[in-house]
Image (tube, rainbow, N blue to C red):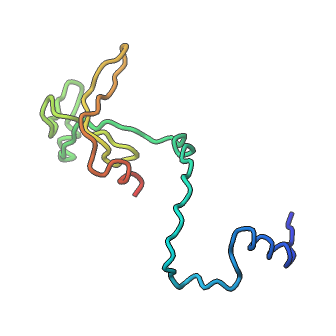
Amino acid sequence: MSSSISDNDFDSLINDTGLTSDENLSEPTSEPTAALPHQDLSFFGKIPVNVTLEVASTEISLKELMDVDAGSVIALDKLAGEPLDVKVNGALFAKAEVVVMNGNYGLRIVELSGNGLNGIGA
């Protein structure tokens, strides 16, 4: 369903918003600009993200991987007790330690990444 807008309706919309059809938008004005109204960003709080805990990693050859069986041990690149990486959608978010809460594993954040949420999704 499409609706057309008359010239009078268009002019009314422009005048109601304080715009004029002959404004030159490319030239800056010396008048102070009004502060933007505070936007409600609560909608974004409902977007799901994937939080993962990366214990450590290592690089091994394919031959070494083919020799792995039950009981094999692969040495990793982090020391025991060292904070683990918390990643949000694959981007480093924080360092944390594992805790147990009511029989479930949890994360205690010990340090936020320098990028915080700004690095996520970039």
Residue 110 x, y percent position in the rendering: 24, 34
Q: Which residue is drawn at 74% across and 73% down?
A: 14
Residue 115 x, y percent position in the rendering: 31, 52
Residue 15 x, y percent position in the rendering: 75, 73
Towards the viewer: 78 or 70: 78
Towards the viewer: 17 or 62: 17
| For residue 116, side relative to residue 27 (left or right) | left
Above or below, 3 relative to 116:
below
| For residue 32, side relative to residue 71 (left or right) | right
Where, quadrant-wise, is the N terminus in this rendering?
Answer: bottom right
| For residue 110, side relative to residue 12 (left or right) | left
Say which quarter of the image contains residue 7: bottom right
Q: Residue at x 54, y 40 (%)?
A: 46
Where, quadrant-wise, is the C terminus in this rendering?
Answer: bottom left
Above or below, 51 relative to 73:
below
Residue 118 x, y percent position in the rendering: 37, 53
Q: Which residue is drawn at 32% across and 44% down?
A: 93
Say which quarter of the image contains residue 12: bottom right
Which residue lies most toward the left here? 79
Q: Residue at x 33, y 48 (%)?
A: 116
